[in-house]
Image (tube, helix red, strand yellow):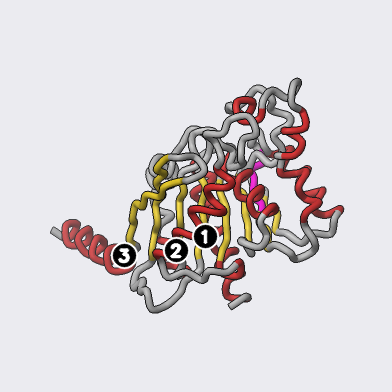
Amino acid sequence: MKRIISTTLLIIFYAATFAAKIDTVTTYSQVMKKDIKAVVVTPDHYSTSKALPVVYLLHGYGDSYAGGWIKKGKGFEVLADTYNMIIVCPDGGVSSWYFDSPVDKTYQYETYLTKELIPFIDKHYATIADRKGRGITGLSMGGHGALYLAFKHQNLFGAAGSMSGGVDIRPFPNNWDIAKRLGTYADHPDNWEKNTVINLVRLLTPNSLALIIDCGSDDFFYKVNCQLHEKLLEKSIPHDFISRPGAHTWDYWKNSIQYQLLFMSNYFKANP
């Protein structure tokens, strides 16, 4: 009997403390001529009368808006309540890498996210429609995408993060369908050089973006993340760099997302 009461109280407590709402929205992409879905998490007591900051949370290779964070990373939603923010999980296709493909016009996800999805979210939700109220992060392919989009569109994002991000794609010419988006490295090296995050550090100036980069020491992307960290140091670009034991796993990312969104929240508070 005591166990039943205890379990019931726990359920009541959880329901009372976590009431974030999860919506699925559909946008029509003019650039790709198709409907694309996204998940939008709004915090408890969300009201259109008060504008909130937004974090765009990108999924990895092979996942989707519904199959990545929402299913495999389930539980992150409570952070929308914790930090009183809106979290948007876009669909980036199974292998978009979040740039505009120069060889496949059906993969134009940079344009979609920056020129179609963000305006849609700002129009339909009570957001702080300014870079000071907008952040972006993601895991693996999404970590590449988050930094790629933020580095190139600093007018849109004030804070950016990466979890186990593929921040230099050049060492992996035969992996994860990147060649389908850019052409082979042997035939189109310039496409790879222009679209790898580490080569976009040149676009940054000190404090132009609030940056947090996290990668486990057992991850196959660990070396390229360390190289990005070193390049940021060389350019005197302030950033948080986190490394701890861990591999390319959901256990790592479920832990990492807590630090990412705390970082974003602190940025938003410091830049009202």
Badge 2 crowding class, 10 Å Cα cut-off, few under 14, some 14 to 19, many 20 or more, is: many
The answer to whether residue 157 is visible is yes
Q: Residue at x 75, y 44 (%)?
A: 198
In the picture of the structure, the residue carrying the numbered disc 3 is 19
Sequence-wise, the earlier of marks 1 and 2 is 1
> Is residue 256 shown left or right of residue 182?
left
At a point 63% along the width and 50% down the height, the residue shown is 149
Residue in the image at 44% along x and 67% along y: 82
Q: Earlier in the sequence, mark 1 or mark 3?
A: 3
Query: What is the total number of numbered labels drawn onto the structure image?
Result: 3
Q: Are marks 1 and 2 in contact (CB under 8 Å)?
A: yes
Q: Earlier in the sequence, mark 2 or mark 3?
A: 3
Secondary element type, mark 3 = loop
| C-alpha span from label 2 to label 3 | 13 Å
Q: Is residue 20 left or right of residue 131?
A: left
- Please state which of residues 16 and 77 is positioned toward the viewer in this rendering: 77
Q: What segment carries the magenta color?
A: 213-217
